[in-house]
Image (spheres, rainbow, N blue to C red):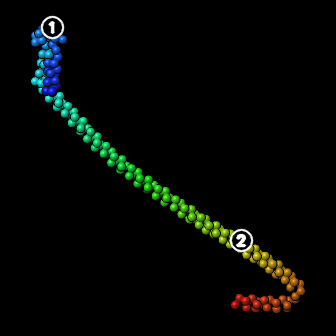
Amino acid sequence: MRKLMTLSALGTLMASPALAASGPFFSLRNTDFVVLLGFLLFLAVLVYFKVPKLLGSQLDRRAEGIRNELEEARALREEAQTLLASYERKQREVQEQAEKIVAQAKVDAESAAEQARKDLDDSIARRLAAAEEQIKSAENSAVREVRDRAIAVAVDAARDVIATQLGAKDKAALVDASIKEIGAKLH
C-alpha cells in the first residue's frame, strides 16, 4: 500500500500545475491542488483505518480458502481415482468370474448332453430288449398254442381212431401202458 501512495504522490508532483489551472499551485483556489489534497486525505483515512491491511488479510483469507479448496479438490480427485481403480478392479473380477461361470456352464451343458445321450441310448436299449422279449414271448406263446392245438387235434384223432379200431381189451392194455410210461417220466 505504501508503494501505491508513493507512486500517486510522485505522479502528482510530476504533473505540471501550469497545465491544470491558473494561479499558484498551492492555493485552495486551484482545483488541482484541492483534488490532490482530497486524494491524499482519502489515502490517509484508508491507512488510518487500516483498510490496506484489512484488504490484504481478506485477500490472504481468500487465497487460503482457495488453497484449501484446491487441496480438498485434489484429495477428492485422489479419492475418486482410488474408487475408480477399485471399481475397475471389481469389474475385472466380476468379468473373470462371469467368464468362469460361462465356461463351467458350457462344461456342465456338454456333460449333461453326454449324460442325456447315454440315458437315451440306455432307454432305447432297454425298450429294444423289452420289445425283443415281448416278441420272443409272443413267439413262444404262439408256438405253444400251435403245439397245444396240434396235440389236441392229435389226441382227438387218436381217440377217434382208438375208439373205432380197438377193442375193450386193447384199450385197457393201452391205458395201462400209458400210465406206466407217464409214471416213469414223472419219477
**In percent of the image, x 53 and y 60: which residue is there?**
109
Disc number for residue 135: 2
Which tag, 2 or 1, sits closer to the chain's start? Answer: 1
Locate residue 171, reporting x and y percent. 84, 89
Disc number for residue 22: 1
The amino acid type, in three-letter code, at marker 2 is Ile
Left or right for 21, reference 159? left
Left or right for 126, reference 170? left
Locate residue 157, reporting x and y percent. 85, 81
Disc number for residue 107: none
Q: Eyeballing the image, is 21 above or below 63?
A: above
**In percent of the image, x 87 and y 89: which residue is there?**
167
**In percent of the image, x 22 and y 34: which residue is there?**
63
Quadrant position of the C terminus in the picture: bottom right
Query: Outermost residue toward the right?
Result: 165
Label 2 secondary element: helix
Locate residue 161, reporting x and y percent. 87, 83
